[in-house]
Image: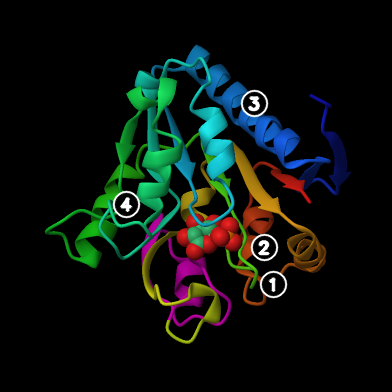
């Protein structure tokens, strides 16, 4: 496998560009597993927060084979659609089907939704779990510049950006990027800040062009994905391939 070229774009972002989807898949999976391995040398457990959507499944499938002590890894979600965890459109289902296989089947998985809980109870439970500091956070970016379930123009965006809570409930009514899945739970900048490692997985030329616009400014109202590098903390590692 070729080494990913690393281009440093200021101190807040490290860009890892790959020539092919296969290199991207393994490059990102190895990057995540190396950080998890290092964490497990230093502490009894570590915590990995994962995004859903259409992009990350090959990376999760590759990561599932990493020879880690998965029984000491807590896997949780960056965001979730207001669906039960076995729903085909849920991020939980994606993580179960692609990551929690092979060696990673031994990981402990915390879903954001659960039968019998309403959305505010689910957010409260997520905020309790979030008292365990995340180690690695894997983010995505939608075609509209959203990340997690923080959408441009959504009602409550200001509150989500400024709250001290790690998770909030989201009503994305009027946000085309949310499709039909308008009720959601999302990580906030406050939930991202404590993580020592931040990654973003993106693919395709159109997202590369969008990324240039996202990196060319600071206002998260225009592109909430900017919170990935404007939230004080470690640099954002962006893994991209065509
Ligand atoms: O709705 C979501 O979208 C983003 C981006 O997804 P993608 O399909 O454009 O890769 C994802 O990161 C987030 O977890 C998900 O809920």
Is the distance from the Cβ of mark 2 to the nearest ligand 1 atom less than 8 Å?
no
Disc 1 secondary structure class: loop
Dot 2 alpha-carbon crowd within 10 angstroms: few under 14, some 14 to 19, many 20 or more: many
Q: CA distance from mark 2 to mark 3?
A: 25 Å
Along the viewing direction, whichever of 42 and 139 lies nearer the viewer: 139
- Residue 180 seen in this snapshot: yes
Q: Earlier in the sequence, mark 1 or mark 2?
A: 1
Q: Earlier in the sequence, mark 2 or mark 4?
A: 4
The residue located at (36%, 49%) in the rendering is 92
Disc 3 secondary structure class: helix
The residue located at (61%, 22%) in the rendering is 34
Q: Is 192 colored magenta in this rendering?
A: no
The residue located at (45%, 38%) in the rendering is 98
Is the distance from the Cβ of mark 4 to the nearest ligand 1 atom less than 8 Å?
no
User: Label 3 belongs to which residue?
Assistant: 30
User: Which quarter of the rendered picture does the N terminus lie within?
Assistant: top right
Residue 16 against residue 221 in the figure, above or below: above
Which percent across, then down, holds residue 206? 77, 65
Q: CA distance from mark 3 to mark 4?
A: 29 Å
The region drawn magenta spans 148-172
Return the mark for residue 127: 4
Q: Quadrant of residue 23?
A: top right
The residue located at (61%, 42%) in the rendering is 198
Label 2 near label 1: C-beta < 8 Å? Answer: yes
Q: CA distance from mark 2 to mark 4?
A: 22 Å
Q: Earlier in the sequence, mark 1 or mark 4?
A: 4
User: Label 2 belongs to which residue?
Assistant: 226
Q: Is 158 colored magenta in this rendering?
A: yes
Q: CA distance from mark 1 to mark 2?
A: 7 Å
Q: Earlier in the sequence, mark 2 or mark 3?
A: 3
User: Label 1 belongs to which residue?
Assistant: 219
Colour setup of the view:
rainbow
């Amino acid at each position: 496998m070729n080494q990913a070229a690393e281009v440093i774009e200021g101190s807040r972002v490290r860009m890892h560009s790959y020539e092919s989807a296969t290199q991207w898949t393994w490059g990102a999976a190895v990057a995540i597993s190396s950080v998890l391995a290092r964490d497990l040398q230093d502490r009894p457990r570590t915590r990995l927060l994962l995004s859903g959507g259409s992009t990350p499944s090959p990376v999760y499938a590759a990561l599932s084979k990493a020879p880690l002590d998965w029984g000491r890894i807590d896997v949780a979600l960056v965001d979730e659609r207001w669906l039960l965890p076995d729903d085909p459109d849920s991020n939980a289902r994606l993580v179960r089907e692609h990551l929690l296989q092979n060696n990673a089947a031994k990981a402990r998985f915390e879903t954001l939704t659960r039968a019998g809980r309403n959305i505010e109870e689910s957010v409260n439970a997520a905020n309790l779990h979030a008292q365990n500091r995340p180690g690695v956070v894997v983010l995505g970016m939608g075609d509209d510049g959203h990340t997690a379930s923080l959408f441009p123009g959504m009602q409550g965006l200001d509150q989500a950006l400024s709250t001290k809570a790690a998770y909030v409930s989201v009503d994305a009514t009027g946000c085309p990027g949310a499709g039909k899945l308008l009720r959601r739970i999302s990580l906030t900048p406050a939930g991202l800040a404590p993580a020592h490692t931040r990654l973003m997985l993106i693919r395709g030329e159109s997202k590369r062009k969008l990324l240039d616009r996202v990196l060319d400014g600071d206002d998260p109202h225009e592109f909430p994905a900017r919170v990935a590098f404007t939230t004080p903390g470690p640099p954002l590692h962006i893994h991209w391939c065509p």
